[in-house]
Image (cartoon, rainbow, N blue to C red):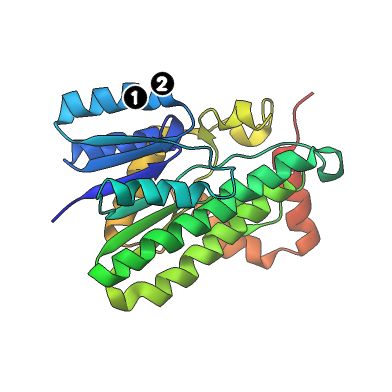
Amino acid sequence: MTNTALITGASNGIGLELAKIHAQRGGDIVLVARSENKLNKLKRELEQRHRINATVIVADLSVPDAAQQVFQQTEMLGLTIDMLINNAGFGGHGFFHERDLAAEQSMIQVNMTTLTNLTHLYLQGMVARRRGKILNVSSTASFMPGPLQAVYYATKAYVTSFSQAVAEEVAEHNVTVTALCPGAVATGFVDAGDLQGVAAFDKAKSAESVAQVGYRDMEKGTLVSFNESGLKFMLNWITPLLSRKRVLKISRQFMEKSA
């Protein structure tokens, strides 16, 4: 039986740490991202250290047919994907009406559309084989609207909802889907999303610690995975009791930049 994981956004951050964890456990990996040099370096490191096989697929997941291209390459290579980890994603800071629309559309494509397409393409084989695990990296942002990150929060709300619905559909086929919902994480996400100075990232957790929680909960088949118990309690038990206007004000305060 194979144990191959396909990981998007594998060149840095949570994706990189998830790749290390899977390799440490003896699993083969398909590494997907735009940075060919970083992927090839990671491939060499993981193969030498853990004696596994790593395959590099260079892909821009903001391109509409990216998921189909990735799927076709794994099919041509005869690879069976046992674990699909949809980690790639990005955000962006600012008022929606002032932000570049093309950037927002790319965010929707990567965070939602490509994730959906990859899930659909690989899920069919998992259901047919009656085994498989999917980890969709979402966010605690998925539990509320996000002023100053309106599109990002909305895309993550989709990921968390979509993951849970599909999990219920495929449970009878011995396939699990987990939504990983971390709080702020210390990765390149801050620079890429113009989030420097945002208060929410003052106490960001390490990508390694988030990946460990996510991988563990994926193995267990946990429906929604949190890396911080305090955030889990707040989102499940406190936030639902507040008025919508209050939630919006709190959410905006978290995203405002310090002077």
Q: What is the quadrant of the C terminus in the image? A: top right
Kindly indicate the quadrant of the structure image that contains residue 119.
bottom left
Query: Against 201, is 112 above or below?
Result: below
Instruction: Pick out the residue farthest to the right.
Output: 97
Residue occupied by mark 1? 40
Along the line of sight, the residue nearer the viewer: 16 or 62:
62
Along the line of sight, the residue nearer the viewer: 4 or 240:
4
Along the line of sight, the residue nearer the viewer: 105 or 137:
105
* Secondary structure type for disc 2: helix
Which residue is depicted at the point 28% across and 61% down?
A: 132
The residue carrying pointer 1 sits among few (fewer than 14), some (14 to 19) or many (20 or more) residues within 10 Å by Cα, namely: some
Q: Is residue 228 visible?
A: no
Which residue is depicted at the point 76% across and 64% down?
A: 243
Residue 63 x %, y %: 59, 44
Which residue is depicted at the point 16% across and 40% down?
A: 26
Q: Is residue 135 visible?
A: yes
Which residue is depicted at the point 45% across and 55% down?
A: 118
Residue 249 x %, y %: 78, 50
Instruction: Locate residue 216 relative to residue 163 in the image: left or right.
Output: left
Q: What is the quadrant of the N terminus in the image? A: bottom left
| Numbered label attached to residue 37 | 2
Residue 49 x %, y %: 17, 25
Q: Are marks 2 and 1 in contact (CB under 8 Å)?
A: yes
Kindly indicate the quadrant of the structure image that contains residue 244.
bottom right
* Secondary structure type for disc 1: helix
The residue carrying pointer 2 sits among few (fewer than 14), some (14 to 19) or many (20 or more) residues within 10 Å by Cα, namely: few
Along the line of sight, the residue nearer the viewer: 142 or 2:
2
Instruction: Locate residue 166 relative to residue 245 in the image: left or right.
Output: left
Instruction: Locate residue 33 relative to residue 46 in the image: left or right.
Output: right
Say which amino acid is labelled 1: Asn
Instruction: Locate residue 77 relative to residue 85 in the image: left or right.
Output: left
Say which amino acid is labelled 2: Asn
